[in-house]
Image (tube, rainbow, N blue to C red):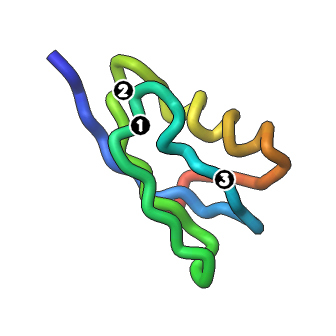
Amino acid sequence: MSKIIKKKLKIDGMHWDLEDLTGIKSARTSYGKQECEVEFDEEQLSLEEVIKTIQKTGYGAQIKN
């Protein structure tokens, strides 16, 4: 059974398409707020993998409180 979770991440200067990653259900980006709300299947992809993928593109990413 899938365990879908939704998290908001603070992203510094972003431009990419997270929805290409396996397990991503949606990714809504607000460039003005420099944040992205990501909904993903935790059984297919971890939050750490999402953050590392963003960081590999050269952007800072962290969990937004």
The residue pinned by badge 1 equals 24
Mark 3 / mark 1, whichever is N-terminal: 3
Q: Quadrant of residue 60?
A: bottom right
Q: Percent position (x, y) of residue 35? A: 56, 67
Q: Is residue 12 left or right of residue 65?
A: right
Cα distance, mark 1 to mark 2?
9 Å
Mark carried by residue 16: 3
Whether residue 64 is visible, yes or no, is yes
User: Callout 2 environment at 10 Å: few (<14), some (14 to 19), or many (20+)?
Assistant: some
Query: In the image, what residue type sits under mark 3?
Result: Trp
**Residue at position x 52%, y 32% in the image:** 21
Task: Pinpoint residue 11: horizontal percent, then vertical percent.
Answer: 66, 61
Q: Amino acid at mark 1?
A: Ile
Above or below, 62 against 46 in this view is below
> Which one is nearer the viewer's eye here, 15 or 10?
15
Task: Tell me what residue is drawn at x 68 percent, y 35 percent.
Answer: 53
Quadrant, the N terminus = top left
Q: Residue at x 48, y 43 (%)?
A: 19
First-in-chain label (1 vs 2) = 1
